[in-house]
Amino acid sequence: MGNWLNRLLGRDNQSSAQSAKERLQLVLIHDRTDLSPALVETLKDEIIAVISKHVEIDPGGVEINLSQTQRENRLVANIPLLAAPGGRRRPRK
Amino acid sequence: MGGKVLTVTSGKGGVGKTTTTANLAVALAATGDKVVCLDADIGLRNLDVVMGLENRIVYDLVDIVEGRARLRQAMIKDKRLPELYLIPAAQTRDKAAVSPTDMIKLCNELRNEVDWILVDSPAGIERGFRNAVAPADQVLIVTNPEVSAVRDADRIVGLLEAEEKGPGHLIINRLKPEMVKRGDMLSTEDVLDILAIPLIGVVPEDEGILVSSNRGAPAAMDERSRAGQAFRDVARRLKGEDVPFPSLDDNKSFFQRLAARFTRAS
Ligand SMILES: Nc1ncnc2c1ncn2[C@@H]1O[C@H](COP(=O)(O)OP(=O)(O)O)[C@@H](O)[C@H]1O
Ligand SMILES: [Mg+2]
């Protein structure tokens, strides 16, 4: 569909070049690492299972992302821990 | 060591490898260097017609490899320039007729004869690509400012790194400055951000490229051609000169240049 039409309808205020760049950056992370989005989901489930054996975590809050700088790629996991029963949520300052 | 082997490749087909090979060969030969270009696209011979030498073919690459012709016999001389030669691809054979070792051996012989050996690679990442890249001292990766072409170029960068052929140097072909300004085409900076390899040329979209391939006279032969100028700049950079990249605003449209000419004249 024409770009002008999208703009007219306010569907996107991003230029098509900007979309091209973002889509390329995403697809290349997967090409360069041979990690498909489906594989990342599998990894996420298994990481949740392994960590849950030892500590209580919030499975809904777990994020696994691929990040990259120039030609280096990194798998970044963000895993929120739940407080132990009766434990302190946060250390006092 | 003698001549230097430059391989022109891309991954994706139709981005301008053959156009680039022909124009760089002409531009380098115009500086007085001795140049041979080698069409490694076996079965899909093209460089001969782009250079306008199709009527003079007797022997081809496979004839040399299989010993039916000596190197010198298969080198077609382009009479328009002092020292420019073409070794055409075989049209009726397939890529399996030549191996990477054959290419290395052939290019090593050519190094003693000329200053530059330009290898035009077929599309893809299979045998033909490996044949073309095997003898390379330096690889030029051609891409277009477009998602699929850049993605394929990235794949080539990865393969070259694995083969320890360096990251390669990038040529962005068919850039349309007006579309970049409008935000509807990836800019040179965008493509460089993504591929992160050194840039050696930016060639504008130019109808003159089609006209010149109709005639079999590469645009680099035409002093007034904008794409030809971009290729001549690449040739100078290959020879170690520090040639600045023109900014988008230097690539004025035909009408702007025409207007500028009238203002100057009056
Ligand atoms: N800078 C350019 N401006 C306009 N047309 C171009 C340009 N570069 C290449 N082309 C055209 O694109 C087509 C494919 O080019 P070619 O060099 O044969 O690509 P490849 O060898 O990579 O398959 C040809 O028709 C050619 O004339
Ligand atoms: Mg070609």
Image (cartoon, coloured by chain):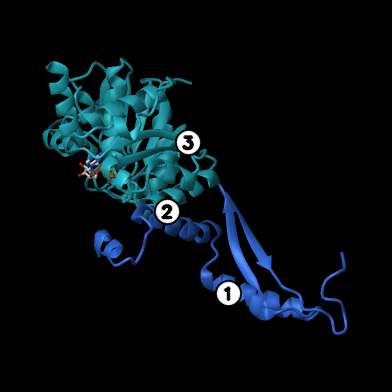
Q: Is residue A78 above or below residue B212?
A: below
Residue B70 seen in render: no
Which is in the foreground here, disc 2 or disc 1? 2
Q: Amino acid at mark 3?
A: Pro
Q: Which residue is mark 1?
A: A41
Q: Which chain is home to disc 1?
A: A
Picture coordinates of residue B19, whole percent (x, y) = 26, 37
Element carrying mark 3: loop
Q: Is label 3's Cβ within 8 Å of ligand 1? A: no
Q: Which chain is home to disc 3?
A: B
Image quadrant for the C terminus of chain A?
bottom right
| x 26%, y 22%: residue | B84
Picture coordinates of residue A57, whole percent (x, y) = 74, 78
Picture coordinates of residue B35, whole percent (x, y) = 32, 23
Residue projecting furthest to the front: A93
The residue closer to the viewer here, B134 or A50, is A50
| x 56%, y 47%: residue | A70
Snapshot quadrant of residue A61: bottom right
**Do marks 1 and 3 both belong to one polypeptide chain?**
no
Picture coordinates of residue B115, whole percent (x, y) = 38, 20
Element carrying mark 1: helix
Image quadrant for the N terminus of chain A?
bottom left
As drawn, the label of residue A21 is 2
Q: Which residue is mark 3?
A: B198
